[in-house]
Image (tube, rainbow, N blue to C red):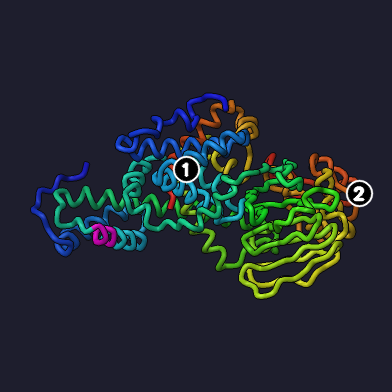
Amino acid sequence: MLPVDASPPQDLQTLYRDHHGWLQGWLRGKLGNACDAADLAQDTFMRVLQRREAETLREPRAYLSTIARGLVADFFRRQRLEQAYLDVLATLPEPEAPSPETRSIMLEALIAIDTMLDGMKPAVRQAFLLSQLEGLTYAEIATQLGVTKRTVSNYMCQAIEQCYLLAP
Amino acid sequence: MTQSSSDPATAGPATSGNGLSQRDEQTLRKQAVAWYARLCSGEATEADHQGLRDWLQQHPDHQRAWERIGAIRQAMQRVPGNIALPTLQAAGRGRRTILRGILLLATTGSAGWLSYRAAEDQALLQPWLADYRTGVGERRSVALADGSRIVLNTDSAADVAFTDAARTITLWAGEILVETAAHLQAANDPRPFLVHTAHGTVRALGTRFVVRHHGERTQVSVLEHAVELRPRDGQQAQVLRAGESAHFTATAISPPQSAGNAAAQWEHGSLVVGNARLGDLIAELARYRPGRLVCDPAVADLRVSGAYPIDDTDQALRVLLQSFPLRMTRITRYWVRIGPA
């Protein structure tokens, strides 16, 4: 459980001075290495700076760890996606493999999609991908997933609604 | 259309009358989502498409909500499907879902709208709203008011607008065959017959021709008589005659090449090639089937000739496998690779 911090409103400088060490330690526990923890601690304070809410914080550590938790999730998602992406590239024959520049652009685009799809039930995610990337009809998706067309339609509505909210 | 919980018409309250004051973002979102889900089903009817057009006309908020759908499509199209699908499938396995709530909170604010590029996204959505559309593997013949005729090939979209001044077709995606041949009454119509694409205009000169939208350029093949090509930003028009084919972009026209009657054989369900690269033939066949069909570069330069059925691409592939030392690998049911045996 996070400690409740009752310190008075403070500016970002104070926030940094009082909690940076604590945050970095907290992140090291999540990530298992000091280098990534230092980077993400920095990113966390950058987010706070952008939001300009530091002066109204009543529970700075709860607030910081909420932001940091999101960044940790992004960090792991990125790692997992990058690995999957490299695995897929490895299966492509040489001429189909994209250039290094294209690769990094594509990776960013994949991360954007993955972020948009985050938290979807696997079947919902699969239905959405087959529809949007392969152009399959609901009947075709239903056959592949072993569900009814009606279910596919429900999956699609769920998926589209989440994307509607999260699309870049 | 059949009634179900996902129907756009039932997803929110009616939008007529004084509904505006009661409008809220959630209703708007549910409606846009339901429309899009309907269009993606593969079973959308002409009434659905008309319904969407009507809904978009009703209120600027509807347009705004629909632009979010455009943003989704935009995001999904930034990576080729043959890379995006397996990557995102692999990344999705075993995912923990604890963070969804945080992400939703963090990104649903008004800031989500800022990075949004409306014009680009609209171009992607335009085919959905076109007067005439075909799905993958579908063909459709449309008789026009002047007696002329267009045939839409697979996965195509076109608008038709006839005014006192001109007969205009706008090709948004895919490929159309246009027939204003001399024996048809259309040839005597004094109004110019124009086909617009993103890259320019094709003007029919009493003729039969094929226009194909390739994304970054337009291809025109003339079967009878002639057409005049005019790139959107180009100074010069160029006449293309029967048996010729050319590409154009917004600024330039390629030199004409000879094109046989094969260019329109798709109208009769055949893909006809003479001494073509196997890679090109496979890419053409891929247009007519859902999912992904790819050719291993190791065999892409094999030369092939013949007529291949586009309404049964599995049969077309079987014919190829019988004639050449090839092997077909099904990576998934909808992802097929043709490689060396």
Which residue is the extreme one toward the left?
A8
Judge whether residue A48 is colored magenta.
yes
Q: Which residues are magenta?
A: A46-51
Q: Chain of mark 1?
A: B
Amino acid residing under circle 1: Leu
Identify the residue position indicated by label 2 in the image: B323
Helix, strand or loop at mark 2: helix
Q: Position of residue B108 (x, y in %)?
A: 34, 47
- Give A134 or A8, whichever is nearer the viewer: A134
The residue to which callout 1 is attached is B56
In the picture, the disc for residue B314 is: none
Tell me which residue sits at (69%, 43%) in the image. B136
Please determine if labels 1 and 2 lie on a single subunit.
yes
Q: Given the image, on which type of amino acid does mark 2 rest?
A: Ser
Tell me if residue B269 can be seen.
yes
Local crowd at mark 1 within 10 Å, few (<14), some, or many (≥20)? Answer: some
Image coordinates of residue A18 in percent, x first then y, are: 16, 59
Q: Earlier in the sequence, mark 1 or mark 2?
A: 1
Q: Could you tell me which residue is drawn at 78 percent across and 72 percent down?
A: B255
Please state which of residues B26 and B148 is positioned toward the viewer in this rendering. Answer: B148
Q: Is residue B167 magenta?
A: no
Is residue A141 visible to us here?
Answer: no
